Image (cartoon, rainbow, N blue to C red):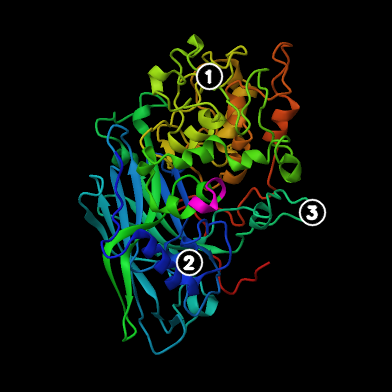
């Protein structure tokens, strides 16, 4: 099932990436959390920054997928403004059938740039645009074996340079919003498509996070490190009927229908060989080589250590089936060391509210190097559950010393099935291995790191009083503590069940959610409560430790610009003449 990468015959993969680093080192940009690996940080035009997949809030018969590239674009980055790169394949991959290895659907965009007036150094003058970018969009419905062209000469919105260049009579004589919206098009196969600059929708205090985990800041004010930066975005709005696996029913059997689960990841690839010619031109040859990929947010930034980051970018999620060396980073996450007072917890005071269970229910230790639930291996109590070797093999209890194989690893590598113990503790009467309230099913065990989305889960309206940027964390909290949701074990829609990590909405605070997950909140949701819960006293499991995790905040919880209510939902890019704070 392992997919071979198409490295060129002329040079080795190592040589290619070494050359790439040298060739693009002159174009490095300001530090950003998106610069997740050493080599791709030298090639920003091919650098995936973020990926989103969600059921469209105003058109729930469609799924919106947004793949962003080119980190930390300065809005005033002229005279050569940022744009998608030529000689790059930007691809969005969809897996909808776990029984078939690899992708089922691939969307591929390639870009061309032209100068309409090479006699000026201005990017826009007298209605002419330099660096004007168009694209071709191709779609494959057979896993990349063949492609059909569905958009020709698609328009990329111009950079938002400033009012004289955009609205002035010496510029394009148009409002920027008109230019930006006019670049949205419909493919011949029915998808809505946008490609162009946007406000970076990711929000996080970069300075504090990478200052040895000082989030929230212990001194000074928290700051969105990506505020007033732009990125370039590819957005597709795709009918659910297009994304369904072959043979799936036209309507889901329930809101957790397994036939409605998809996996989404994005990538960028370049030709293996770039040649600088004596006449000043460049030529490209050789096989296409994947240089960047993205599925779940922050995987390569905050889970994979620096010595493995470039390797992670080179492989596909399907390579992770047999290439298991990086599984250890999820079984024993580095961040877990800073949430354990017996390790280095005291050295990172900002993460003090986040503490992993070391004696859950008086028996189970999930700290790094401990056994978690592995001590139950072979116990009849596991019969018929997801932890039973007869159900999912050894996926979830592979060996001793891998405590987070039951929560973090499946979240990033398989999704979560609607099978005991992965149901909310509501109705379990203190036994995490009992049946509880059905919660989520985005199980797709076909590869590794992807965004997994159950398309049958309804949309939480953005104006709903229960809408929360904490996604599934808040959905679980509602199902455990809020009436009438916590009064029965019936399957029902819980607000924010459509949130990360069941896909990813633009509003989702993924940094906080992932830190809470490392701190064991998923374990608590299924009944493996925190250490300060008295399992024999019958008290409330909503203990101080649990509340500390649920109320933890990095200090930056929203984007610096409001998102739009219609496709492509992202905010317009910042102008080069707007003042940076």
Mainly helix, strand or loop, the magenta region? Answer: helix
Q: In which quarter of the image is the N terminus?
A: top left
**Do the numbered discs 2 and 1 sit on residues whose CB atoms are within 8 Å?**
no
- Marks 2/1: CA distance? 48 Å
- Marks 1/3: CA distance? 42 Å
Name the image quarter holding residue 431. top right
Say left or right for 483 vs 3.
right
Say left or right for 278 vs 297.
left
Q: Which residue is drawn at 46% across and 73% down?
A: 174
Which of the numbered marks, if any, corresponds to residue 219? 3
* Vertical comparison of 39 with 372: above or below: below
**Does dot 2 land on a helix, a strand or a loop?**
helix
Q: Residues within 10 Å of mark 2 (few under 14, many from 20)?
A: many
Residue indicated by mark 1: 437
Which of the numbered marks, if any, corresponds to residue 42? 2
Q: How crowded is mark 1: few (under 14 residues within 10 Å), some or many (20 or more)?
A: many
């Amino acid at each position: 099932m392992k997919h071979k990468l198409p490295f060129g015959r002329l040079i080795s993969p190592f040589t290619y990436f070494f050359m790439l680093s040298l060739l693009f080192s002159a174009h490095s940009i300001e530090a950003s959390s998106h610069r997740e690996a050493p080599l791709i940080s030298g090639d920003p035009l091919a650098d995936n920054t973020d990926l989103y997949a969600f059921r469209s809030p105003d058109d729930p018969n469609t799924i919106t997928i947004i793949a962003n590239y080119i980190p930390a674009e300065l809005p005033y980055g002229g005279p050569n403004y940022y744009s998608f790169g030529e000689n790059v394949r930007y691809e969005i991959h969809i897996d909808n059938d776990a029984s078939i290895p690899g992708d089922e659907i691939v969307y591929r965009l390639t870009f061309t740039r032209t100068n309409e007036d090479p006699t000026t150094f201005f990017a826009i003058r007298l209605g002419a645009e330099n660096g004007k970018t168009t694209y071709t969009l191709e779609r494959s419905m057979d896993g990349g074996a063949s492609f059909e062209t569905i958009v020709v000469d698609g328009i990329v919105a111009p950079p938002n340079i400033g009012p004289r260049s955009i609205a002035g009579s010496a510029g394009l004589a148009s409002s920027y919003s008109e230019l930006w919206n006019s670049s949205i098009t419909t493919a011949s196969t029915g998808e809505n498509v946008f490609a162009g600059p946007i406000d970076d929708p990711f929000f996080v205090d970069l300075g504090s996070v990478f200052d040895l985990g000082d989030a929230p800041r212990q001194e000074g004010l928290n700051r969105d490190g990506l505020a007033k930066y732009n990125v370039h975005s590819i957005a597709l709005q795709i009918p659910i009927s297009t994304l369904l696996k072959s043979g799936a029913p036209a309507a889901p059997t329930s809101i957790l229908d397994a036939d409605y689960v998809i996996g989404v990841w994005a990538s960028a690839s370049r030709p293996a060989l770039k040649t600088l010619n004596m006449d000043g031109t460049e030529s490209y040859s050789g096989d296409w080589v994947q240089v960047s990929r993205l599925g779940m947010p922050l995987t390569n930034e905050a889970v994979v250590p620096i010595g493995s980051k470039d390797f992670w970018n080179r492989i596909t999620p399907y390579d992770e089936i047999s290439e298991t060396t990086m599984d250890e980073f999820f079984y024993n996450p580095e961040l877990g060391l800073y949430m354990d007072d017996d390790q280095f917890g005291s050295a990172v005071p900002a993460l003090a509210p986040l503490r992993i269970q070391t004696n859950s229910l008086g028996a189970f230790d999930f700290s790094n190097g401990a056994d978690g639930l592995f001590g139950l291996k072979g116990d009849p109590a596991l019969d018929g559950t997801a932890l039973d070797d007869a159900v999912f093999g050894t996926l979830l209890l592979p060996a001793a010393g891998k405590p987070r194989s039951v929560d973090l690893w499946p979240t990033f590598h398989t999704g979560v099935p609607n099978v005991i113990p992965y149901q909310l503790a509501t109705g379990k009467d203190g036994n995490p291995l009992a049946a509880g309230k059905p919660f989520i099913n985005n199980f797709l065990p076909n590869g590794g790191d992807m965004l997994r989305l159950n398309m049958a889960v309804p949309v939480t309206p953005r104006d709903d009083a229960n809408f929360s940027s904490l996604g599934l964390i808040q959905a679980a909290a509602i199902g455990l503590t809020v009436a009438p949701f916590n009064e029965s074990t019936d399957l029902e829609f819980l607000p924010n069940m459509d949130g990360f990590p069941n896909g990813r909405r633009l509003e989702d605070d993924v940094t906080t959610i992932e830190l809470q997950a490392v701190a064991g909140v998923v374990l608590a949701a299924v009944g493996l409560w925190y250490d300060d819960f008295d399992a024999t006293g019958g008290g409330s499991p909503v203990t101080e430790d649990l509340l500390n995790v649920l109320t933890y905040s990095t200090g930056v919880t929203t984007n610096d610009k409001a998102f739009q209510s219609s496709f492509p939902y992202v905010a317009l890019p910042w102008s080069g003449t707007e003042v940076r704070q």
